Amino acid sequence: MLFYIKSYKYEWFFGLVLFGFYLIPLGFLVLKAGYVPKIMGWLLIIAGISYVVGHLKVFLYPDLNTSFSMFTALRELVFMLWILIKGSRTKESQID
């Protein structure tokens, strides 16, 4: 049972690596969109890279210092708030 409890951490980190790989193309799509600020796209790309590097560290290079990736959730939060507040107010004529 202890083995399964400890392995949960590695399974969770692997899921976050996959989530990081999802955020990178999402950031590029946001950059291509004309109605979303470009900074949102760059923040998502940086967050995706931070997730991938920060959580692959456990598997590949456990001695690496990845303290730079502690603000990844903040970058996603900014994008989420923009979608909730400003994104719902965009006109359909702006999207085309």
Image: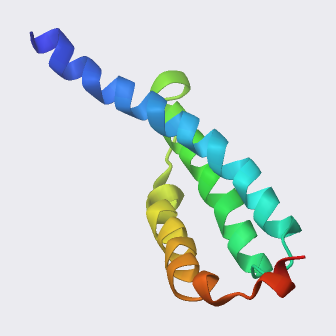
- Residue sitting at x 66%, y 68%: 43
On screen, residue 28 versus residue 58, left or right, reads right
Q: Is residue 53 visible?
A: no
Q: Quadrant of the C terminus?
A: bottom right
Q: Picture coordinates of residue 60 (x, y %)?
A: 55, 23
- Observer-nearest residue: 52 or 61? 52
- Observer-nearest residue: 43 or 65? 43
The relative height of residue 7 versus residue 72 in the rendered view (above or below) is above
- The image quadrant of residue 27 is bottom right
Q: Picture coordinates of residue 52 (x, y %)?
A: 59, 40
The relative height of residue 54 versus residue 14 in the rendered view (above or below) is below
- Observer-nearest residue: 90 or 53? 90
- The image quadrant of residue 95 is bottom right
The number of callouts visible is 0
On screen, residue 33 versus residue 13, left or right, reads right
The relative height of residue 58 versus residue 76 in the rendered view (above or below) is above
- The image quadrant of residue 91 is bottom right
The relative height of residue 39 versus residue 86 in the rendered view (above or below) is above
- Observer-nearest residue: 83 or 23? 83
On screen, residue 93 versus residue 11, left or right, reads right
- Residue sitting at x 52%, y 44%: 54
Q: Is residue 18 visible?
A: yes
On screen, residue 66 versus residue 90, left or right, reads left
Q: Picture coordinates of residue 77 (x, y %)?
A: 47, 71
